Amino acid sequence: MKKLPDSELMVMQAIWKCDAPVLRVQIDEILQEIHPIAPTTLLTLLTRLENKGFIRIEKTDKAAKYYPLIEEEEYLAEESKNFIQKLFNGNMSVFANALCDSGISKEDLQELSKLLERSE
C-alpha cells in the first residue's frame, strides 16, 4: 500500500468520516473546517486517490459518489508498521522505550497496555 501525501490523506480522512457513498459536497464541508481547498484541487486529489486504488468513483447524472476501498484502520496499521520499521528498525523494545521517554502520560500508557493485552 502506498503512503499518501498529506493532501491526499486529508481527503481520505474526510471520506472515512462519512458513510459510503460519499458526495463531494460532504468531503468539502469537512475540509472547509480544517483546511479549505479549491473545488478543482479536490477533484484532482479524488482522481489521484482513485488511480492509487484508495477509492472508487461512481459517476452519475447528478453527482459523483465516492466509495473508500481501503479502511482507515488498514491504512493506519500499515503506516504504523512502516513508521516503526523506518525509525526503529522494527525493534518494538526500542520503540516502547522511546514512547516511555517521550513524556506520554501514565493514563495513556495504561490504555496502551490494555490494548496490547487484548491483542494477545
Image (spheres, grey):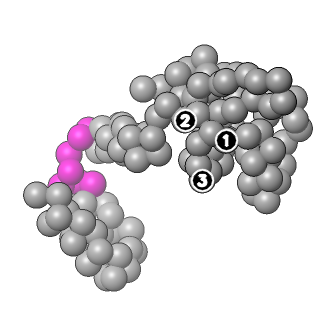
Is disc 3 surrounded by few (<14), some (14 to 19) or many (20+) residues within 10 Å? few
- State how far apart marks 2 and 3 are (Cα): 11 Å
Instruction: Tell me the element at label 2.
Output: strand
Q: Residue furthest top?
A: 51
- N-terminal of the two: label 1 or label 2? 1
Amino acid type at mark 2: Pro
Q: Which residue is mark 3?
A: 17
Is disc 1 surrounded by few (<14), some (14 to 19) or many (20+) residues within 10 Å? some
Span highlighted in magenta in the image: 89-95
Write the residue at 40% across / 47% down.
73
Task: Kindly identify which numbered label has been placed on residue 68.
Answer: 2
Residue 51 percent coordinates (x, y): 60, 17
Q: Are marks 1 and 2 in contact (CB under 8 Å)?
A: yes
The reply, left or right, for residue 103 in relation to residue 88 is: right
- State how far apart marks 3 and 1 are (Cα): 9 Å
Q: Residue furthest front?
A: 61
Instruction: Tell me the element at label 1.
Output: strand
Q: Quadrant of the C terminus?
A: bottom left
Front position in the image: 20 or 114: 20
The reply, left or right, for residue 6 in relation to residue 53 is: right
Q: Which residue is mark 1?
A: 22
Write the residue at 17% across / 58% down.
119
Q: In terms of image quadrants, where is residue 93?
A: bottom left
- State how far apart marks 1 and 2 are (Cα): 9 Å
